[in-house]
Image (tube, rainbow, N blue to C red):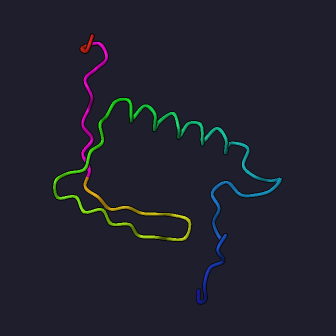
Amino acid sequence: MDGERPVAAWISFGLGPRQCIGMRLAYMEEKLVLAHLLKRFDITTTEECKIFFKRLPGIVQARAAVQHVPKQSLASSK
C-alpha cells in the first residue's frame, strides 16, 4: 500500500447513524475501571522517570516509569 491513509481510516465506534450502540456503555465501563484503579492504587513516578510524549494522529503516547502502589485496604484503616 503506497500513499497516506485517510485521517479517519479507523474510528473505533464508527460515526453517524450507524454508530456502535455499545459506545456509551464502553465509555461508562472505562470510567468505572479507572475509578476503581485510582481508588485502590497510588500511581507515582519512579526516581529515574523521564517523561517523553510522542504525538500520533489522535493519540498521545507517554513513556514513563511508574509504580502502582496498593493503598491500605479500607477494612484495615478503620
Q: Residue at x 55, y 70 (%)?
A: 57
Asked if the stretch drawn in magenta spans residue 68, the answer is yes
3 and 7: which is toward the camera: 7
- Residue 23, image x and y in percent? 67, 45
Q: As drawn, which residue projects farthest toward the top? A: 78
* Left or right of residue 43: residue 36: right
Q: Is residue 21 magenta?
A: no
Which residue is outermost to the bottom? 2
Question: At 53% from the left edge and 40% from the top edge, which residue is drawn?
Answer: 30
Q: Which residues are magenta?
A: 66-75
Residue 72's place in the image compared with 12, above or below, is above
Q: Quadrant of residue 53?
A: bottom left
Q: Quadrant of residue 34?
A: top left
Q: Residue lying farthest left?
A: 47
Q: Position of residue 75 (x, y in %)?
A: 29, 12
Q: Determine whether, in the image, residue 58 is placed left or right of residue 77.
A: right
Q: Which image quadrant: the N terminus?
A: bottom right
Q: Judge from the rendering whether residue 26 lies leftward or rightward of residue 74; answer left or right.
A: right
The location of residue 33, given as percent across then percent down, is: 47, 36
Place of residue 49 in the rendered image (x, y in percent of width and height, measured from the top left): 22, 58
The number of numbered discs placed on residues in the rendered structure image is 0
Task: Identify the image quadrant of the C terminus.
Answer: top left
Q: Residue at x 64, y 38 (%)?
A: 25
Residue 37, compared with residue 74, is above or below; it is below
Whether 70 is drawn above or below 5: the answer is above
Q: Residue at x 75, y 52 (%)?
A: 19
Residue 53 relative to residue 51: left or right: right
